[in-house]
């Protein structure tokens, strides 16, 4: 084989050994989703689009809120597109907008409901992967109204491990909308010594 082919083959071999956490967070293919235990949570299937019959763990909802708002250039504001009590993830004026097709109004790219479920936009391939693995359900208006492109409901985390997957999907959404490549490990709160 030509030496350039050997170099390419060696590079491919090395790259396949790189753990997903080291790869770019913006590349959904490098962060494969595990199957969600028990599959998808039942939902209303209509607007208002809410999850049903899910046991909420307040400490996980609190952690989700705390860590989601560690994203750069994201402000915590009451939602303008969801039910009262939900918090919008608002992109500040300094955040770029690479794809606003999934933003319903203003610069609120996602919102977290009081039960820890949330709505956020994902790229089409990630929507399919997340739905197949039981993490999300497509919004009833996906693809039918402006601002609902790729919009999904991400179910509440029930365990610490599920919290990490939810945070990865929030980061995937953020990276999709902003064009940035933030990593989910950047959402670790700093503790005082």
Image (cartoon, rainbow, N blue to C red):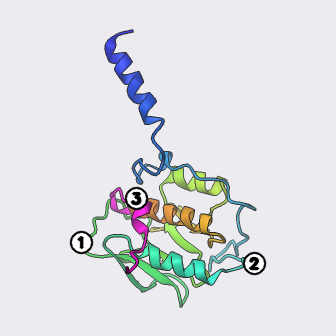
User: Which residue is depicted at the point 59% across and 75% down?
Assistant: 117
Q: In the image, residue 104 lies at what x, y percent?
A: 44, 73
Answer yes or no: is residue 141 visible.
Answer: no
Q: Is residue 121 magenta?
A: no
Q: Is residue 174 visible?
A: yes
SS state under label 3? loop
> Which residue lies under the disc numbered 2?
53
Q: Magenta stretch? A: 176-193
Work out whether 152 lies above or below 27: below
Question: Which residue is found at the position 39% from the left and 64% from the top?
Answer: 186
Quadrant of the image for the C terminus? bottom left
Q: Which residue is mark 3?
A: 183
Prevailing secondary structure class for the magenta stretch in the rendered image: loop
Looking at the rendering, which quadrant does residue 106 occupy? Answer: bottom left
Mark 3 Cα within 10 Å, few/some/many (few <14, many 20+)?
A: some
- Which of pointers 2 and 3 indicates the residue nearer the eye? 3
- From the viewer's perspective, is residue 19 above or below residue 8? below
Q: On the rendered image, what quadrant is the N terminus found in?
A: top left
Q: Earlier in the sequence, mark 3 or mark 1?
A: 1
Q: Foreground: 55 or 22? A: 22
The residues bearing labels 3 and 1 have C-alpha atoms spaced at a distance of: 19 Å
Please identify the quarter of the rendering in which residue 3 is found. Answer: top left
Q: Are marks 1 and 2 in contact (CB under 8 Å)?
A: no
Q: Which mark is residue 94?
A: 1
Q: Nearer the viewer, residue 107 or 190?
A: 190
The residue lying at 40 percent from left, 83 percent from top is 76
* N-terminal-most mark, 1 or 2: 2
């Amino acid at each position: 084989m030509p030496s350039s082919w050997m170099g390419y083959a060696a590079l491919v071999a090395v790259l396949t050994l790189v753990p997903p956490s080291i790869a770019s967070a913006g590349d959904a293919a490098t962060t494969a989703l595990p199957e969600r235990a028990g599959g998808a949570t039942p939902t209303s299937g209509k607007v208002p689009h809410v999850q049903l019959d899910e046991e909420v763990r307040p400490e996980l909802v609190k952690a989700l809120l705390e860590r989601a708002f560690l994203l750069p250039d994201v402000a915590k504001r009451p939602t303008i597109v969801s039910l009262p009590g939900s918090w919008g993830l608002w992109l500040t004026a300094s955040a770029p907008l690479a794809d606003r097709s999934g933003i319903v109004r203003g610069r609120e790219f996602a919102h977290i409901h009081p039960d820890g479920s949330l709505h956020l936009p994902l790229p089409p391939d990630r929507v399919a992967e997340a739905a197949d693995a039981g993490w999300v359900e497509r919004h009833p208006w996906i693809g039918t109204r402006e601002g609902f492109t790729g919009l999904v409901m991400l179910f509440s985390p029930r365990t610490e491990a599920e919290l990490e997957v939810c945070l990865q999907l929030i980061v995937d959404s953020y990276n999709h909308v902003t064009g940035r490549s933030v990593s989910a490990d950047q959402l670790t709160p700093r503790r005082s010594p």
